[in-house]
Image (spheres, rainbow, N blue to C red):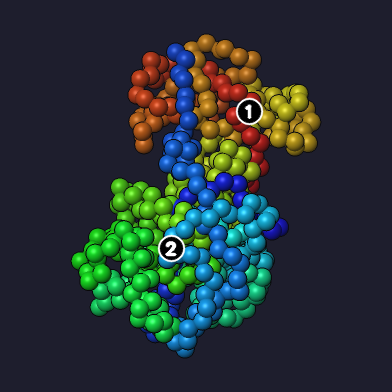
């Protein structure tokens, strides 16, 4: 099934990519407890400014024939000027990248198992998943560094086939930056333009504007060894962006940075995305990073897309228990449908009853169902306050990541995790409690085998 990336609202800005892994070098691949919003959801809403991405006119994809040193006209995005333009809405924006039923195996191991995806112009799409799920292989196939066993990659409707990386209007930023250690900042950024025989005056002008864009003006003569990790990352990004690619690829570019610098660079990436408006594909296993930075998230598992949607869709309406637990943490519970009324389902559980929303699914009383509910939506009471509640006992209290984590064990041994802001909690370990949530806070998911 093809997952079509829909444009909702822009909430990110971040740049990306350049340099085939080493194609420019040698052609080889180198009581009542009130709960509040979870920090993942809260940080997404607070950290993301509302803005529009720049949109250049659709043009034929540039073929950067770096190996031959020929200059060809790239599809311009007004990068040097940094102008912002309003993007076309929804279906009006063309599909710039499409994956059609891509498969890939290494030996007897199937890495990608028929994945399909459409990405519209100006979107920021994150491939999110655990290690070994196929994220990097997908990125390398888009870049032309790997060849799929079957399926096709299309850029602006044109099949890439066996087209070499330097012939694709795609650039990549890698986690290790891949800067040339013997070149200063200016020459690193200008490298691709020089290979394309761009006039020196134009190179000087574009590099100067790019340094201003990434806030490194005055660093032209610095060597990579004289810069911090965050500064080197910005140089790698500038080198990618200056070539005006149609799609920018980022392979966990912030993974080597410490937490504080990582968050700072997230903001830098958002700011640049706001100015550039280029489509890019970002790889991470960090759920918070994905939620904060993306327009669209594609959750990967075992070489397949488990679910694709906006951050709010992925977080608030997970389709499977894997997505519910991987993006944020959720409590996954099973029960039998006791009644169905409108969009609300009441399920019987051995420790009480619980409610969830139906979301248009066909459900009949007696059906065995599984729901997911986020810990920040659960309330804890000493006495039962509503018809739907589960009985449990407080087993643990801990302060993690700015949230108070409360664990309660149900009578059947199931653990429920409740989270809330603040450290004040007037219930003690060992006390019996009732756990309740509104029906609209819980969603049906598919139980894993």
Q: Position of residue 146 (x, y in %)?
A: 53, 75
Mark 1 closeness class: few <14, some 14–19, many ≥20 residues within 10 Å: some
The answer to whether one can see residue 140 in this image is no
Residue 194's place in the image compared with 264, above or below, is: below
Which residue is at 61% across, 59% downward? Answer: 120
Which residue is at 48% across, 65% downward? Answer: 78
Q: Position of residue 315 (x, y in %)?
A: 55, 41
Q: Secondary structure at mark 1?
A: helix
* 179 vs 28, nearest the viewer: 179
Q: Earlier in the sequence, mark 2 or mark 1?
A: 2
Which residue is at 42% across, 41% downward? Answer: 47
Q: Position of residue 105 (x, y in %)?
A: 58, 71
Mark 2 closeness class: few <14, some 14–19, many ≥20 residues within 10 Å: few
Residue 81 tag number: 2
Left or right: 140, with 219 as reference point: right
Q: Work out how far the residue at label 2 is from the one at label 1, CA to CA, in angstroms.
A: 46 Å
Q: Are marks 2 and 1 in contact (CB under 8 Å)?
A: no
* 318 vs 415, nearest the viewer: 318
Residue lying at the far left in this picture: please name it: 226
Residue 38 tag number: none
Q: Secondary structure at mark 2?
A: loop
Q: Quadrant of residue 429?
A: top left
Residue denoted by label 1: 440
* Count of all numbered marks drawn on residues in the image: 2
Residue 141's place in the image compared with 437, above or below, is: below
* 255 vs 447, nearest the viewer: 255
């Amino acid at each position: 099934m093809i997952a079509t990336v829909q444009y909702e609202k822009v909430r990110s800005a971040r740049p990306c990519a350049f340099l085939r892994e080493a194609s420019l070098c040698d052609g080889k691949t180198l009581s009542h407890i009130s709960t509040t919003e979870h920090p993942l959801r809260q940080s997404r809403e607070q950290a993301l400014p509302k803005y529009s991405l720049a949109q250049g006119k659709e043009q034929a994809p540039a073929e950067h024939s770096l190996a031959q040193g020929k200059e060809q006209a790239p599809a311009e995005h007004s990068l040097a000027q940094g102008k912002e333009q309003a993007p076309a809405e929804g279906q009006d924006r063309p599909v710039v990248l499409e994956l059609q039923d891509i498969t890939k195996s290494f030996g007897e191991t199937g890495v990608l198992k028929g994945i399909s995806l459409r990405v519209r112009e100006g979107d920021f799409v994150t491939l999110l998943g655990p290690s070994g799920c196929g994220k990097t292989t997908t990125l390398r196939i888009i870049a032309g560094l790997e060849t799929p066993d079957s399926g096709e990659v299309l850029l602006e409707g044109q099949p890439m086939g066996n087209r070499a990386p330097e012939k694709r209007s795609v650039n990549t930023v890698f986690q290790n930056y891949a800067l040339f250690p013997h070149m200063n900042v200016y020459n690193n950024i200008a490298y691709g333009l020089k290979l394309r025989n761009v006039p020196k005056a134009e190179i000087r002008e574009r590099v100067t504007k790019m340094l201003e864009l990434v806030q490194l003006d005055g660093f032209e003569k610095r060597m990579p060894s004289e810069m911090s990790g965050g500064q080197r990352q910005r140089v790698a990004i500038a080198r990618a962006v200056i070539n005006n690619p149609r799609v920018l690829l980022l392979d966990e570019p912030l993974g080597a940075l410490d937490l504080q610098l990582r968050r700072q660079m997230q903001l830098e990436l958002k700011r640049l995305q706001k100015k550039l408006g280029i489509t890019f594909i970002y790889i991470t296993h960090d759920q918070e990073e994905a939620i904060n930075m993306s327009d669209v998230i594609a959750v990967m598992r075992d070489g397949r897309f488990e679910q694709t949607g906006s951050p709010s869709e992925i977080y608030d309406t997970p389709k499977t228990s894997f997505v519910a637990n991987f993006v944020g943490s959720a409590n996954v519970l099973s029960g039998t449908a006791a009644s169905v009324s409108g969009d609300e389902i009441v399920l019987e559980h051995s420790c009480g009853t619980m409610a969830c929303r139906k979301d248009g699914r066909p459900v009949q009383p007696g059906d065995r169902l599984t729901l997911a509910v986020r810990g920040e939506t659960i309330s804890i009471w000493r006495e039962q306050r509503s018809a739907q509640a589960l009985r449990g006992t407080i087993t643990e209290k801990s302060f993690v990541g700015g949230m108070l984590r409360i664990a309660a064990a149900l009578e059947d041994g199931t653990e429920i995790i409740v989270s809330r802001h603040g450290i004040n909690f007037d219930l003690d370990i060992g006390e019996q409690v009732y756990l309740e949530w509104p029906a609209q806070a819980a969603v049906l998911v598919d139980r894993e085998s």
